[in-house]
Image (cartoon, rainbow, N blue to C red):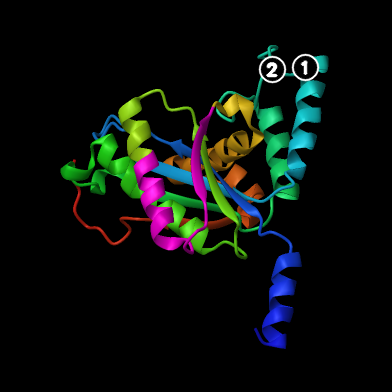
Amino acid sequence: MSPNDALQAEDDEHAAPLPTLYIFLDEGGNFDFSPKGSKFFTLTCVSLYRPFTLHTDLDTYKYNLIEHRIKPRLEMEYFHCAEDNRFVRSKVFSKLSGSVPHESVDSVIVEKRKTGPALQAPEKFYPKMLGYLVRYAVEKAAHGVGEVVVITDSIPVAKKRKAIEKAVKTTLAAMLPKGTPYRIMHHASRAHYGLQIADYFNWAIFRKWENGDTAAHTTVAKQVRSEFDIFRTGTRFYY
């Protein structure tokens, strides 16, 4: 070994370990591919590194709500954007705007009427869209990662859960440097602020596309890195 190689080996031995990239996922819309269903389906992820500094702030705010009985749900377990009242929702979005890193949120937008019948089954549709989203999020990671941990809400349907796991593992195995570990985990959203944060961002993005309501989205626009309308060039409608 040359002197230079020895010095490099010593530097590598003392180098700080690469951080773990956490990707928290949420979805909006439904799987009703008909005029009765939602117009859009959104898949959103928030990419974060530790320390999760916002978690302490949200925890403090949650207990403030409990003590002052501000929230209609007095058994305040967790934040859920669609169920939180307007006062709470506005406050949480303000916290997200101030604490979540800029350009850490990505979303795949699906105009459902442009989705061909062969892709409409959840076990085919969901993994396909999720694969696009996770690939983009990992590609845009700010620096090298020591491990990738993808966390979704609990998924009671085994068939869907297995399809999601296969999509994520296939995507990560193909694009991460050889030997980089990765995992996918399914946690109840009430158990992790990362999932609650993803829920809030996804709600803002879904409302923008589904209803043209941009109020919440405007508050956190700097955090949103991408909104990929996956069928944007499509011209055929299936219903």
Does residue 173 appear to the left or right of 140 in the view shown? Answer: left
The residue carrying mark 1 is 66
The amino acid type found where label 1 is placed reads Ile
**Which secondary structure, mark 2?**
loop
Q: Residue at x 38, y 60 (%)?
A: 174
**Which secondary structure, mark 1?**
helix
Q: Name the foreground residue: 182 vs 151.
A: 182
- What is the residue that sits farthest to the top in this orientation? 74
Contact check, label 2 and label 1, Cβ < 8 Å: yes
The amino acid type found where label 2 is placed reads Met
Circle number at residue 57: none
Badge 2 or badge 1: first in the primary sequence: 1
When the figure is inspected, residue 112 is found, relative to residue 189, above or below; the finding is below
Does residue 205 appear to the left or right of 36 in the view shown? Answer: right
Residue 17 coordinates in the image, percent (x, y): 69, 59
Q: Is residue 169 visible?
A: yes
- The magenta stretch is 165-187
Residue 20 coordinates in the image, percent (x, y): 63, 51
The residue carrying mark 2 is 76
Does residue 123 appear to the left or right of 223 in the view shown? Answer: left
